[in-house]
Image: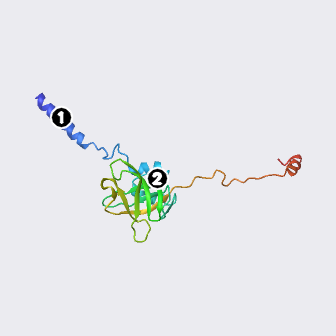
Amino acid sequence: MIGGFRALFAAMMLALGALTVTPAAAGVLQCVPFARQASGIELYGNANSWWGQAEGRYDRGHEPRVGAVLAFSSSRAMPVGHVAMVSKVVNDREVLLTHANWSYRGGIERNVRAIDVSPDNDWTDVRVWYGPIGKLGLRSNPARGFIYANPPRDETSGVRFASADRATAGAEAARGAY
């Protein structure tokens, strides 16, 4: 009787353990937090939502710039999209990307080649270096474009500097203008 109870208890615990959901990527570096940290662009959620979230918050476009994030669309191969930071612009059709979780699960790749293969030269179809084969990936990947990090704020913007003629300043002070 006790043996049967133990077997039943063990079976129940095994069933409960199977129902406990642990994200498949728990503890694995993903592209989104890496791109956020590398670029300074403060967007959250799946990579495929970044383009829409950026509207009105960050400039977006189809010209590669260092520090910008290339936002990939969802596809069969990438259901939640992908984001990667531009580390160097080689020319208008080629950049080097720094990103995470592309060639290797949780891995970081720095300065890997990506080329624009879109017919309109607008970075909406991109081939990216793929480590396991040691060259550009065999398939192209749909992309939305680039999200540009805001430039550093000029601390003096909006501040007016004035100088006063010492003689005028002395006369104004005497009249109590200060």
Which quadrant of the figure has residue 116?
Answer: bottom left
Frontmost of labels 1 and 2 is 2
Residue 10: image tag:
1
For this rendering, which residue is in front, 82 or 43?
82
Q: Is 63 on the left-hand or right-hand side of 161?
A: left
Mark 1 and mark 2 in contact? Answer it, CB < 8 Å: no
Tell me, yes or no, if residue 22 can be seen here.
yes
Please say if 51 is above or below 169: below
Residue 43: image tag:
2
Residue 73 image point, x, y percent:
38, 61
**SS for dot 1:** helix
For this rendering, which residue is in front, 95 or 47?
95
Q: Is 5 on the left-hand or right-hand side of 95?
A: left
Q: Amino acid at mark 1?
A: Ala
**SS for dot 2:** loop
Closer to the chain start, of discs 1 and 2, is 1
Residue visible at 12% across and 29% down in the picture: 3
Tell me, yes or no, if residue 80 can be seen here.
no
Give the spatial CA distance, label 1 vs label 2.
44 Å
Q: Classify the position of the N terminus by image quarter.
A: top left
The residue most toward the left is 1
For this rendering, which residue is in front, 111 or 73?
111
Q: Amino acid at mark 2?
A: Leu
Residue 175 image point, x, y percent:
89, 48
Residue visible at 19% across and 37% down in the picture: 12
